Image (cartoon, rainbow, N blue to C red):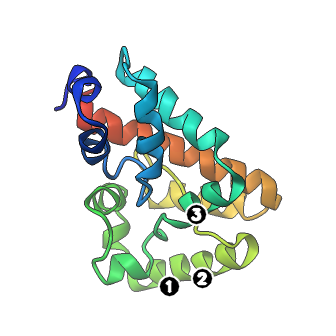
Amino acid sequence: MIPVDALNAATPVRFVELLDGIFEHSPWVAERAAAARPFRSREDLHAALCAVVATAPRHEQMALIRAHPELAGRAAVRSELTAASAREQQGAGLDACTPQQFAQLQRLNAQYNERFGFPFILAVRGHDRAGILAQWERRLGNAPEAERAEALRQIERIARFRLEDLLGG
C-alpha cells in the first residue's frame, strides 16, 4: 500500500510511475493530475484524475478508451493483458469460459467494436459472466455518444478500484 502522502511528496516522474496502470496505457492522466497536488485522500486523487480525463480533448479520451483491451479478447488469449486487467478479468471468470461462451464473447466484441469503434469497457469487479453478458447486450442498443460517455464512466470505476488496490480501501 502506498500512502497518499508518499504520492504528494514524489517527484512528478515518480508520481506517474507509482500510478502506472491506473488508467490503462495512459500515463498522461497522472502526468497532468500531478500539478493538482497535494491530495487529501484517495477520493481527492481519484477526482483529480477523473477531472483530467473529463477535460481532455475528445481525441485523447478516445485514445484512452481504445487503450483498454477487449474482454476475453485477443490480448487475453495471447497473455498480453496488463497485470491489473488480467486480475480483473480472472476475477469475473472470463478466463474460465467454455468454448461456446468464448465464441459468444468474440461475437459480442466484434459487434460492439463494429458499432462503436472501440472495445466494450466494463468495470467487471463484482460481475460474473452472466452479468457481463447482460450489460453487453443492453449497451449494444445505446446511441454512440451515450456509449462513449458510459465507457468513460466505466474507466472511472476501474480507476477507483485500482486506486483502492494501490492505496488501500
Which quarter of the rendered picture does the C terminus lie within? top left
Q: Identify the residue at image location x=38%, y=19%.
A: 39
Q: Amino acid at mark 1?
A: Ala
Which dot marks residue 103?
Answer: 1
Residue 5 pos. (x, y %) = 23, 20
The answer to whether residue 136 is left or right of residue 163 is right
Which dot marks residue 82?
Answer: none
10 Å crowding of disc 3: few (<14), some (14-19), many (20+): few
Disc 1 is placed on an element classified as: helix
Disc 2 is placed on an element classified as: helix
The answer to whether residue 30 is left or right of residue 87 is right
Residue that carries the numbered disc 2 in the rendered image = 107
Residue that carries the numbered disc 3 in the rendered image = 63
Residue 89 pos. (x, y %) = 36, 61
Q: CA distance from mark 2 to mark 1?
A: 6 Å
Residue 142 seen by the camera: no
Outermost residue toward the top?
40
Q: Are marks 2 and 1 in contact (CB under 8 Å)?
A: yes
Residue 37 pos. (x, y %) = 39, 23
Q: Amino acid at mark 2?
A: Arg
Q: Amino acid at mark 3?
A: Ala
